[in-house]
Amino acid sequence: MADLLSPKALSAASPARLHVEVLDRETGKVIPARFYLTDATGKNWAPAGAITYDKNDEHNFISSGAFSIDLPAGRYSLICERGPEHRPYTGSIDLKTGEDSAVKIPLERWIDMNRLGWFSGDLHNHRKLEEMPRLLLAEDLNFAPVLTQWIWEDRPVSTTPDDAIAVRQVDATHAYSMLNEEIERLESGPGAVDLLGLKSIVPFRGYRLWPPNDEFCAPAHAQHAYVDAEKIMWRDVAALVALGLVDFAGVVHNHFNRHNVLLETDRWGMIPKEQPEFNTVAGMPLWAMDVYYRFLNCGFRLPVSGGSASGVMASPLGYNRVYVKVSRPFSVDRWLSAVKAGRNLRRTAP
């Protein structure tokens, strides 16, 4: 990755060596987390073998909880995050040539949502399948469907592997699914829908304008899968909701990312913004809620969802997430059923 420099970029001069370990403050156990390591010039660094993410302004890496890296001498900024339930760590480190420096980071959990019966999910995810087990644990995220089949306008950007299975359990409270599909036709098209929890991928036939998205939502429902109107403001959402084809709709969506709020919507094919304030950073969530309450005022019982589009947008996995009240034991089926039932909370990390 161009912006995350590995130890191979060092010169032959003796480097400094940095050891970092992340501990759960309550238990003292080593825990995985996400990191940002930056030198005084703004360059981003990552240890060899780490999962790295470099998308626009977002440059991070994942560690299992402890890592070592050789670096040039100098001052570095280190940020450590583990989802919204842990207080983030920010610190600076001065490294001297030829010396080892060790940093222990005790991350404090300010709330334990699982203990309270709430389990988190990020419903819009384009990360690599092989990365998912480590990402879920490092982000303290219980569930994420990977949109392995992604149709953009009239062609596949990615296709589901032949050996994909419905759900892969990482441990008792973390899982990801593979048979999920995004059909995304923007600008003059109908918008995007995500088909989640499929038994088999719904074939796509058509182009940007045809057929309408009900042609794909109905076959998904025939499989007892779920339809997420990925953004509640897409042009065709009102028709799909009226037809009973939407199970939940995105209010905390990928226009909210870790670095800014994307205000451009007209050219992507969303409904018009009726208030000038909706074109501001502060007004963007108000616009989503204004649209949502119009559905409620029309008598539709419409649960809401959230997703980051990590893999495409400048956000880590789980930055936008939904918390769902789930009866134990945790399972993906129970989680998705609870979202459809509206037993959820939405969260965008600060």
Image (tube, rainbow, N blue to C red):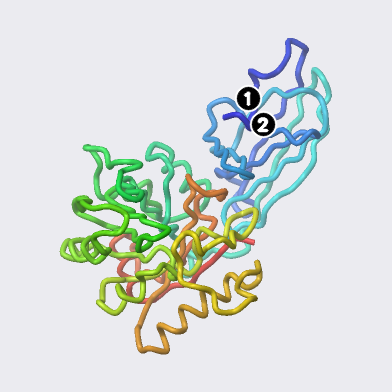
- Residue 276 visible? The answer is yes
Residue at 57%, 48% (x, y): give it.
314
Q: Position of residue 285 (x, y in %)?
A: 57, 71
The residue at 81%/28% (across/down) is 95
Kindly indicate whether the residue at mark 1 contacts the one at mark 2 (C-beta within 8 angstroms): yes
Quadrant that contains the C terminus: bottom right
On residue 6, the disc is 1
Pick whichever, 66 or 129, lies toward us.
129
For residue 222, above or below residue 29: below
What secondary structure is found at the residue carrying circle 1?
loop
Q: Residue at x 40, y 55 (%)?
A: 143
Residue that carries the numbered disc 2 in the rendered image: 45
Residue type highlighted by circle 2: Trp
Q: Position of residue 114 (x, y in %)?
A: 47, 63
Q: Secondary structure at mark 2?
A: strand
Decide if residue 168 is on the left or right side of residue 110: left
